[in-house]
């Protein structure tokens, strides 16, 4: 799974995103997906999401959860 395919990004998943102002440095911000903002099925720079904290950025990593 990666952040470039919309089908991999789900509301409630823990992800790391790069904020617009951190695109040059690549600094990542972690949080829980509240809304998926990209309508297309994929995006070369990552699917744009809003975190529960209100921050908006493109998904770089998706964290796997073991629900056992």
Image (tube, grey):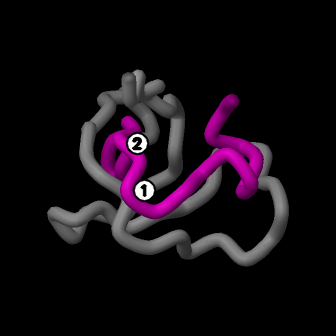
Q: Residue at x 77, y 53 (%)?
A: 43
Secondary structure of residue under mark 2: strand
Would you name the residue on which mark 2 appears? 18
**Residue 20 place in picture, x, y as percent:** 40, 55
Q: Residue furthest front?
A: 68
User: Where's the N terminus, which quadrant?
Assistant: top right
52 on left or right of 3: left
The disc placed on residue 24 is none
- Residue drawn 52% across the image and 44% down it: 59
Q: Is residue 41 above or below residue 61?
A: below
Image position of 5 (left or right of 38) = right
Q: Is residue 50 magenta?
A: no
Label located before the other in sequence (2 or 1) = 2
- Quadrant in the picture for residue 42: bottom right
Q: Which residues are magenta?
A: 1-22
Q: Residue furthest right?
A: 41
Q: Mark 2 and mark 1 in contact? Answer it, CB < 8 Å.
A: yes
Looking at the image, residue 3 lies above or below residue 38: above
Percent position of residue 46, x then y: 64, 47
Residue bearing the label numbered 1: 57
Relative side of 42 to 51, left or right: right
Q: Residue at x 55, y 61 (%)?
A: 48
């Amino acid at each position: 799974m990666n952040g470039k395919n919309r089908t991999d990004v789900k509301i409630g998943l823990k992800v790391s995103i790069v904020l617009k102002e951190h695109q040059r440095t690549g600094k990542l911000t972690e949080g829980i997906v509240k809304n998926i903002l990209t309508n297309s099925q994929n995006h070369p720079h990552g699917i744009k999401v809003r975190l529960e904290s209100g921050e908006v950025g493109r998904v770089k990593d998706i964290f796997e959860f073991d629900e056992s």
